[in-house]
Image (cartoon, rainbow, N blue to C red):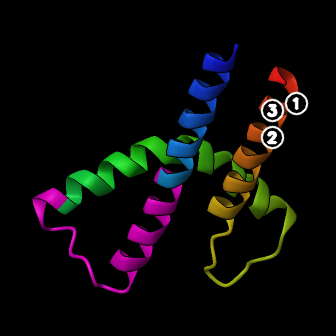
Amino acid sequence: MIAVYNLLSNIIEIYIWLVIASAVLSWLIQFRVINTHNRAVYVVVDFLHRITEPALKPIRRLIHQILPNLGGVDISPVLLILGLVFVQNLLVDIFF
């Protein structure tokens, strides 16, 4: 059972880092520090977008319905990370 817990915990941890990388890259693109016309950058950005967007899109929809316009600030990655940390803590309670 410890192996299953470690596997699930590591997958969640990797996904948290992918969400952070996606958010940081979106800021760098927005401030024009990174140019997406570079093929390598485009591949990385596309990969991160395809991996994180299915989880972020429902959160964005929910935020848009509940909260007023935050002036372009996207808090969905923060909420997703908080949810993933919550799931990690639930795994500790389930397995131990």
**Whole-percent x, y for residue 76 in the image:** 67, 61
Q: Secondary structure at mark 3?
A: helix
**Gap in angstroms between the C-alphas marked 1 and 3:** 4 Å
The residue at which mark 3 appears reads as 92
Q: Residues within 10 Å of mark 2 (few under 14, many from 20)?
A: few
Q: Quadrant of the N terminus?
A: top right
From mark 2 to mark 3, how far is it between C-alphas? 5 Å
Where 92 falls versus 94 (above or below)? below
Q: Is residue 23 magenta?
A: yes
Which amino acid type is marked by label 2?
Asn
- The main secondary structure of the magenta stretch is helix
For image coordinates 51% across by 61% down, the residue present is 20
Q: Quadrant of residue 68?
A: bottom right
Dots 1 and 2: beta carbons under 8 Å? yes
Q: Residue at x 73, y 58 (%)?
A: 79
**Is 25 displayed left or right of 91 in the figure?**
left
Q: Which structural element holds mark 2? A: helix
Pick the front one: 75 or 65: 75
Q: Amino acid at mark 3?
A: Val
Residue 74 painted magenta: no
Residue occupying image coordinates x 49% and y 66%: 23
Residue receiving disc 1: 93
Magenta highlight range: 18-40
Amino acid carrying label 1: it is Asp
Point out the image quarter for the C terminus: top right
The answer to whether the residues at label 1 and label 3 have Cβ atoms under 8 Å apart is yes
Judge left or right: residue 20 versus residue 36.
right
Horizontal side of 54 relative to 92 (left or right) equals left
**Marks 2,3: beta carbons within 8 A:** yes
Tell me, for residue 89, which label it has, or none: 2
